[in-house]
Amino acid sequence: MSSIQDQIEACLARAEPDVEVLLAEVVGGVTVRLFIDHPQGVSLELCERVSNALAPVRERYALEVSSPGRDRPLTRPSHFRRFVGARARVRTRDRYDGRRSFTGELVGASERDLTLAAGNGVMTIPYDDIQRCNLVSD
């Protein structure tokens, strides 16, 4: 998890405790792209409140706040467990079988790794080796 994500989560824990930070990433060194979720869904009003609560981040970066959408990022073991049975694209830091990108069904998720049934078989990938993972629309 990035330090910007840690900073955002700490700030939102006080200002908007029901907001879950799915992913915060710095894009091009000038923009923070933030994907959030909420038990009642993500509205424009919630995105505005989150943006206002993150004034210290806005002092250093342009800030984009949005819902996860259909291509929801998965970043924590609880996210992977919640979506077992769904299709996902996993991009790894290192090559597995000569590749770094795999698309398939999430068939398992532990505290340390996920299991993906992809075109080349079932594989286990440690979370530490994942660069990015998103659900894939059918």
Image (spheres, rainbow, N blue to C red):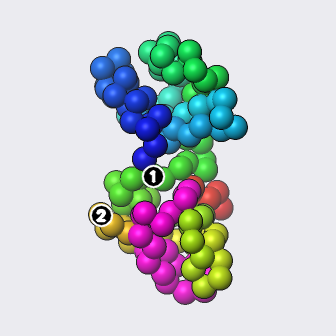
Expressed as whole percent of the image width and height from the top left, the position of residue 16 reads 36, 21
Whether residue 107 can be seen here: no
Is 45 placed left or right of 6 in the picture?
right
Residue type at mark 2: give it. Glu
Hey, which quadrant is residue 113 in on the image?
bottom left
Label of residue 111 in the image? 2
Work out whether 115 lies above or below 11: below
Indicate which disc, 2 or 1, sits on the residue closer to the N terminus. Answer: 1
Q: Circle 1 sits on which residue? A: 75
Residue range (magenta): 114-133
Residue visible at 43% across and 38% down? 3
Numbered circles on residues, count? 2
Residue visible at 41% across and 70% down? 126
Is 101 placed left or right of 107 in the picture?
right
Expressed as whole percent of the image width and height from the top left, the position of residue 73 reads 53, 49
> Which element carries disc 1, helix, strand or loop?
loop
Expressed as whole percent of the image width and height from the top left, the position of residue 45 reads 53, 16
Residue visible at 48% across and 66% down? 129
